[in-house]
């Protein structure tokens, strides 16, 4: 039996990823345009902001993926990759429920 989908996580994850990608693409584009036009100082500031953002976004997504709150009891669940479902599954030790987070492996 496969676990039911988590009610909010996948939606949040996809929305966050989309916004993060737009923000990161903006920083990269600004940095490249400014550097190309000779604005070295501000151009590098955008380039560094881009690199910091990438690291921050990846770290935050991994953190959120492994710290999902249980929709039933609110407890932080344990997340594990489910090879069979090709997605991440969170298990709650408080109320013994499992939730399919729906985030495909490698995405
Ligand atoms: Zn629970």
Image: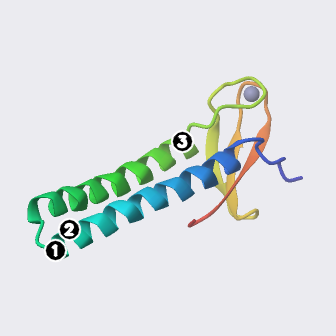
Q: Position of residue 31 (x, y in %)?
A: 25, 65
User: Which corner quadrant holds the C terminus?
Assistant: bottom right
Say whether marks 2 and 3 touch (CB < 8 Å).
no
Q: Regarding ligand 1, which quadrant of the image does it lie in?
A: top right
Report helix, strand or loop for mark 3: helix
Instruction: Say whether marks 1 and 2 touch (CB < 8 Å).
Output: yes
Q: Are marks 1 and 3 in contact (CB under 8 Å)?
A: no
Return the mark for residue 34: 2
The x and y percentages for residue 57 are 42, 51
Percent position (x, y) of residue 82?
69, 57
Mark 2 residue crowding within 10 angstroms, few (<14) / some (14–19) / many (20+): some
How many numbered marks does the figure carry?
Answer: 3
Q: Residues within 10 Å of mark 1 (few under 14, many from 20)?
A: few
Secondary structure under tag 1 reads loop
Dividing the picture into quadrants, the one containing residue 94 is top right
Q: Is residue 19 left or right of residue 68?
A: left
Q: Is residue 46 above or below residue 101?
A: below
Sequence-wise first label, 1 or 3: 1
Circle 3 Cα neighbour tier, 10 Å, few/some/many (<14 / 14–19 / ≥20): few
Mark 2 residue element: helix
**Where is residue 88, by image quadrant?**
bottom right
Q: Residue at x 28, y 59 (%)?
A: 51
Q: Mark 1 sits on what residue?
A: 37
Q: Nearer the viewer, residue 106 or 14?
A: 14
Report the mark closest to the observer, 2 or 3: 2
Residue highlighted by disc 3: 64
User: Residue at horizontal 78%, vertical 41%?
Assistant: 7
């Amino acid at each position: 039996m496969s676990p039911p989908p988590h009610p909010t996580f996948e939606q949040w994850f996809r929305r966050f990823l989309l916004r993060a990608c737009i923000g990161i693409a903006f920083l990269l584009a600004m940095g490249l345009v400014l550097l190309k036009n000779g604005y070295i100082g501000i151009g590098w500031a955008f380039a560094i902001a881009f690199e910091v953002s990438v690291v921050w976004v990846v770290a935050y997504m991994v953190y959120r993926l492994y710290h999902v709150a249980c929709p039933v009891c609110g407890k932080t669940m344990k997340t594990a990759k489910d090879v069979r479902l090709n997605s991440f599954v969170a298990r709650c030790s408080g109320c013994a429920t499992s939730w399919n987070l729906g985030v495909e492996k490698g995405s």
